[in-house]
Amino acid sequence: MKQQGVCCLFYIYVCCSIGEAFSELQLKMIDTQQKVKLADLQIDQLTRVQKHAKLTHTEISSLPDNTRLYEGVGRMFILQSREEVNNLLTDKQKTVDEKIKELEQKKVYLERSVKEAEDNIREMLLSRRAQ
């Protein structure tokens, strides 16, 4: 009789720990999915910045050489040479390209984490049904 009680307590303990692990995996999966969505939003925003810089660069290159160019700084504008403006735009494009690559790598890693969490949840459910 005592042995049945111990087995019953052990079964309850196992079920509770499986439930806790399941909850933790669900939370991890939800958190990771939110991070993937955030990375997508950041990539979209950086892509818009990149397009804007490219358009500005093409427009500037079509202007006559004697055109005065101004850079917006806070609430004022500063006269800049054409070369300086082109350099700023090129630097901006390089920075954005690097950030997009980093975010895409992060997104791949996060998507892999989501898939692993889904697989673990699926495994847990299958093992629980087998019991």
Image (tube, rainbow, N blue to C red):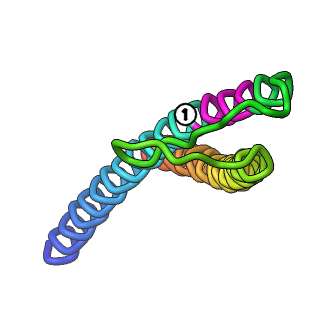
Residue 112 in the image: x percent, y percent? 66, 49
- Residues in magenta, as a range: 46-56
Where is residue 66 drawn, in percent x and y?
A: 79, 33
Mark 1 — residue?
45
Q: How many marks?
A: 1
Residue 12 location, quadrant: bottom left
Which of the pair 11/110 is nearer the observer? 110
Mark 1: give few (<14), some (14-19) or many (20+) Cα within 10 Å. few
Secondary structure, magenta segment, majority class = helix
Front in this rendered view, residue 44 or 10: 44
Query: Is residue 131 visible to the viewer in this orientation of the structure?
Result: no
94 in the magenta segment? no
Identified at 34% across, 49% down, the residue is 27
Residue drawn at the location 62% of the way across and 44% of the way down:
111
Residue 95, horizontal then vertical, whole percent: 69, 55
Residue 53, magenta (yes or no): yes
What's the amino acid at mark 1? Answer: Gln
Vertically, is 65 above or below 112?
A: above
- Compared across the picture, whether 26 is left or right of 19 comes to right
Q: Position of residue 53 (x, y in %)?
A: 69, 35
